[in-house]
Amino acid sequence: MRTGKYFVVCLSIAFLLAGVYVIQESVRNSGHYAEEGILVGALLSALALAAMLWSIKLHLVMKALKRHMKGR
């Protein structure tokens, strides 16, 4: 079994929380740099989505590998 089984899930949650926080703060304090804050928050949220998709892909690959090794 992998040692860092839930690392990617925790990473995606951290990116999502950071993205939501940056978006919320930039909307709440909408000054000169509000647009940049929203873009940074959206970038962090996109990284969270990519990390979650990576986690799902790793899970499916490990599942297929177990099935393949069981068949031998």
Image (cartoon, helix red, strand yellow):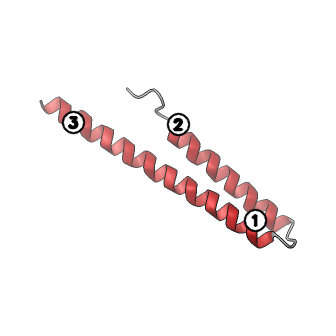
Looking at the picture, which amino acid does disc 1 mark? Gly
Q: Are marks 2 and 1 in contact (CB under 8 Å)?
A: no
Q: Quadrant of residue 41?
A: bottom right
The residue under the point 82% across, 70% down is: 33
- What separation in Å lies between label 3 and label 2 (alpha carbons)? 23 Å
Pointer 3 and pointer 2: residues touching (CB < 8 Å)? Answer: no
The percent coordinates of residue 71 (x first, y second) are: 13, 32
Amino acid bearing label 2: Phe
Compare residues 3 and 28 and report the one nearer the observer.
Answer: 3
Is disc 2 surrounded by few (<14), some (14 to 19) or many (20+) residues within 10 Å? few
Residue 19, x across and y down, in percent: 68, 56
Relative to 63, say whether 47 is above or below.
Answer: below
At mark 2, the secondary structure is helix
Residue 67: which numbered mark, if any? Answer: 3
Q: Disc 3 and disc 1: Cα gap in Å?
A: 45 Å
Q: Examine the rendered structure and indicate whether residue 14 appears above or below residue 22.
A: above
Q: Secondary structure at mark 1?
A: helix
- Viewed as shown, does residue 49 lie left or right of 24? left
3 or 2: tag closer to the N-terminus: 2
Q: How many marks?
A: 3
Q: Which residue is mark 2?
A: 7
